[in-house]
Image (tube, rainbow, N blue to C red):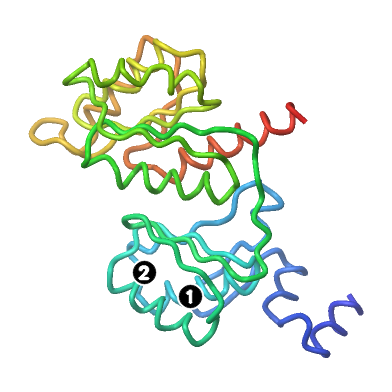
Amino acid sequence: MRELLDAVADGTLSPEQAEAELNGYVTGEAGRFDAARQSRRGIPEAILAEGKSTAQVVALAETALETTDRALLTRVSDDQVDALRTALAESAPDATIERRGTTVRVVGSDFDQPELGVTVGIVTAGTVDKPVGDEAEIVCADAGAMIDRVDDVGVAALTRTLDQVERFRDADVLIVAAGREGALPTVIAGLVDTPVIAVPVSSGYGHGGDGEAALAGLLQSCTVLSVVNIDAGFVAGAQATLIARAIHSARR
């Protein structure tokens, strides 16, 4: 306790960092940020921007950066990204902002990037499914996994799926995102001995076109795979990260 107080007093530790050390979380006007989730759970807390005001998103991102040296944000709008860039130009000018679709990763200059000798394959059925793949990719890349990204290999033209089978087999864990009837993860899972995490996507139209048909099909898959919720790219990325860490530890 005294060391924390001395560090705050001499400026080597901010009050937010001290609060995170003591409580595991930091409380601000935008809510509580779980700064200890990385050490407790193996994956950091992500900030869901959807449904939050721009001011709340910026405040939470700054808190994450202050306490953990990085911030992961999902479902971020263009206006929120612009506001975040403006705010961080003043509060954290050395921070790096990486954006993939609606997912954003902010890394501070003191962030110690981990490295995992594990390959996560991220596969999407069509162009409309790519944003979900982007969300999963940023989570896995943040953990230091090597990424092999394969897009637009849906089963409507099965040859383009089969052409990539060796790449699928070379991955240590696979995330496969597909909308419509959700067939792609089932097909791939029947061709590889790699763990497959299926992500149903809310692409398509008509009956079940909001992802429900894909979810139902994947839950009934006759090949062995795991299924996350509709559009849950972050969850798929987090699950793949935990598997990748276990593989990395076993190899060491």
| Disc 1 packing (10 Å; few <14; some 14–19; many ≥20) | some
The residue tagged with tag 1: helix, strand or loop? loop
Q: Residue 108: x, y in percent?
A: 59, 70
Any mark on residue 113, and which?
A: none
User: Type of residue at label 2?
Assistant: Lys
- Closer to the camera in the image, 74 or 191: 191
Count up the numbered dots.
2
Q: Residue 94: x, y in percent?
A: 56, 77
Q: Which residue is mark 1?
A: 30
Left or right position of 206 against 156:
left
Residue drawn at (76%, 68%) of the image: 21
Identify the mark nearer the N-term, 1 or 2: 1
| On screen, residue 71 above or below 232 | below
Say which quarter of the image contains residue 232.
Answer: top left
Q: Which residue is mark 2?
A: 52
Q: Residue 246: x, y in percent?
A: 68, 31
Residue drawn at (37%, 30%) of the image: 176
